[in-house]
Image (cartoon, grey):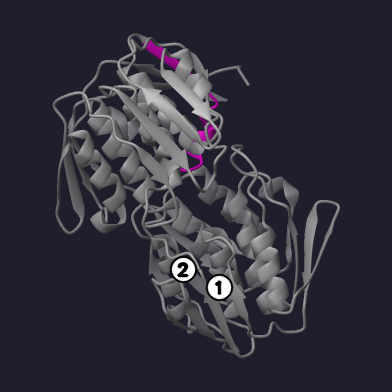
């Protein structure tokens, strides 16, 4: 198992290219189960989650190759309709195979998912949507069993706007008989990316980019190619990291419109941010002003960068409140930041960060993917060395994060450890 050793005090400066979106890639990959052929996904990040999902698809008969961020998936010979626990336990996105399998093959057996440990994230919306489409769902011995002759078009309203459930039900609906209407659907950039991919495969979808999707089911789809959108979460992480080190950094291969919420908050904190069509430059000269955030569905501030914002606010001149309406229990990183000297108070669905405390390096432990990033960032502004254990969480979603940060001037090294 690996750990990071981060030495604080460096100022980030320079240019870095942002990878393809991890979350979008994991939604695009299971589309290969909807049709036979060879799929090519450009700008695919080389991270742990992509490899895990590739191995899961391989277990079903998909042949895959990832070279120079080009992922090729050959679904010509699907041999299994089961997603076993050994793969699904490692990430929640494995549930995405459920919709395509039951839609095309009429059956699926998928283990209940795992992933980051920051509170309950039920899959009830996935199951309710598939049941509304006509699937017979049972849960036995930790596995979801889904069966149907052919899914039938329906109207389904998401009680809560959910990216995962929207993606899964959308993939199922494109092969259902008749028309399906999805209301209160998520419209994050990752959802738009999967909808665009399905259209390229021959699906008939209208309302893309809005909370209402109309899908006219088709009898068959074909293989297609796609270029994965830039990772807005990685981009947001690097913008905040640059700001908290009083740096000057340019991000390339980004879509600034996907970062509107973070950019607005960074400007409120005192950062200077400029954008072009596919780049963002940020500079910061002083300690930030305290800025509150509330994580909510897109286009609001994303839950996946609220931990990073907490680390940033440790440098603010006052107190900032962080709320999370999507995952109210997503504050497991706070005790680890406190080990560095952070003054943070937590309550039901919120944290209050009081800036200005003296931060000193210590040994801390990652609890989930985005918490890992916040600890790395905190280590960059703490005095001395910070040892971050269990960085395999971070490797799930960031491609070579330590190399990118080091190229900007950070002092980070990866070492093997016996710690668990």
Q: Which mark is residue 16?
A: none
Residue in the foreground of this view, choosing between 280 and 222 = 280
Q: Residue 166 appears at what percent x and percent y? A: 54, 66
- Range covered by the magenta-colored residues: 385-397
Residue 209 image point, x, y percent: 38, 71
Label whose residue precedes the other's in the sequence (1 or 2) = 1
Query: Would you place residue 97 above or below residue 4 in this image?
Result: below
Q: Residue at x 62, y 55 (%)?
A: 94
Residue at figure coordinates x 73%, y 67% from the top left: 81
**Label 1, label 2: how far apart the Cα atoms are:** 9 Å
Asked whether 303 or 100 is in front, the reply is 303
Answer whether residue 390 is magenta in the image. yes
For label 2, the residue is 194
Mark 1 surroundings within 10 Å by alpha-carbon count, few (fewer than 14), some (14 through 19), many (20 or more): many
Q: Identify the element where label 1 is drawn.
A: helix
Please say whether residue 334 is one of the residues in the magenta stretch. no
Residue, x 39% and y 25% (percent of image)? Answer: 353
């Amino acid at each position: 198992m690996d750990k990071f050793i981060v030495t604080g005090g460096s100022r980030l400066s320079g240019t870095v290219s942002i990878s393809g979106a991890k979350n979008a890639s994991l939604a695009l990959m299971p589309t290969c189960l909807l049709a036979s052929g060879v799929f090519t996904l450009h700008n695919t990040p080389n991270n742990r989650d992509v490899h895990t999902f590739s191995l899961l698809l391989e277990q079903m008969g998909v042949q895959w190759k990832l070279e120079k961020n080009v992922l090729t998936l050959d679904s010509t010979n699907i041999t299994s309709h089961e997603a076993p626990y050994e793969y699904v336990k490692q990430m929640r996105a494995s549930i995405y195979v459920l919709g395509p399998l039951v839609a095309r093959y009429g059956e699926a057996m998928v283990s209940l998912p795992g992933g980051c440990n920051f509170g309950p994230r039920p899959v009830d919306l996935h199951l309710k949507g598939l049941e509304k489409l006509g699937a017979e769902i049972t849960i036995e011995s930790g596995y979801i069993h889904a069966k149907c002759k052919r899914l039938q078009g329906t109207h389904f309203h998401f009680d809560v706007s959910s990216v995962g459930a929207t993606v899964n039900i959308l993939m199922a609906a494109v092969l259902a008989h008749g028309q399906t209407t999805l209301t209160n659907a998520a419209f994050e950039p990752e959802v738009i990316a999967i909808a665009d991919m399905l259209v390229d495969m021959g699906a008939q979808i209208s309302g893309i980019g809005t909370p209402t999707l109309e899908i006219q089911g088709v009898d068959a789809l074909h293989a297609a190619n796609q270029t994965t959108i830039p990772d807005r979460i990685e981009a947001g992480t690097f913008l905040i990291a640059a700001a908290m080190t009083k740096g000057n950094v340019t991000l390339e291969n980004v879509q600034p419109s996907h970062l509107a919420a973070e950019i607005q908050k960074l400007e409120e904190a005192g950062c200077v941010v400029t954008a072009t069509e596919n780049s963002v430059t940020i500079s910061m000269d002083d300690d930030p002003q305290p800025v509150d955030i509330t994580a909510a569905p897109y286009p609001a501030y994303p839950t996946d960068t609220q931990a990073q914002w907490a680390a940033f606010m440790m440098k603010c001149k006052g107190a900032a409140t962080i709320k999370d309406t999507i995952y109210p229990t997503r504050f497991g990183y706070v005790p680890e930041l406190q080990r560095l000297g952070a003054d943070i108070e937590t309550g039901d669905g919120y944290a209050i960060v009081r800036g200005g405390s003296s931060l000193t390096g210590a040994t801390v432990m990652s609890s989930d993917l985005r918490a890992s990033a916040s600890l790395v960032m905190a280590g960059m502004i703490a005095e001395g060395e910070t040892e971050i254990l269990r960085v395999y969480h971070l490797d799930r979603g960031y491609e070579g994060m330590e190399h990118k940060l080091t190229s900007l001037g950070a002092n980070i090294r990866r070492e093997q450890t016996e710690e668990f």
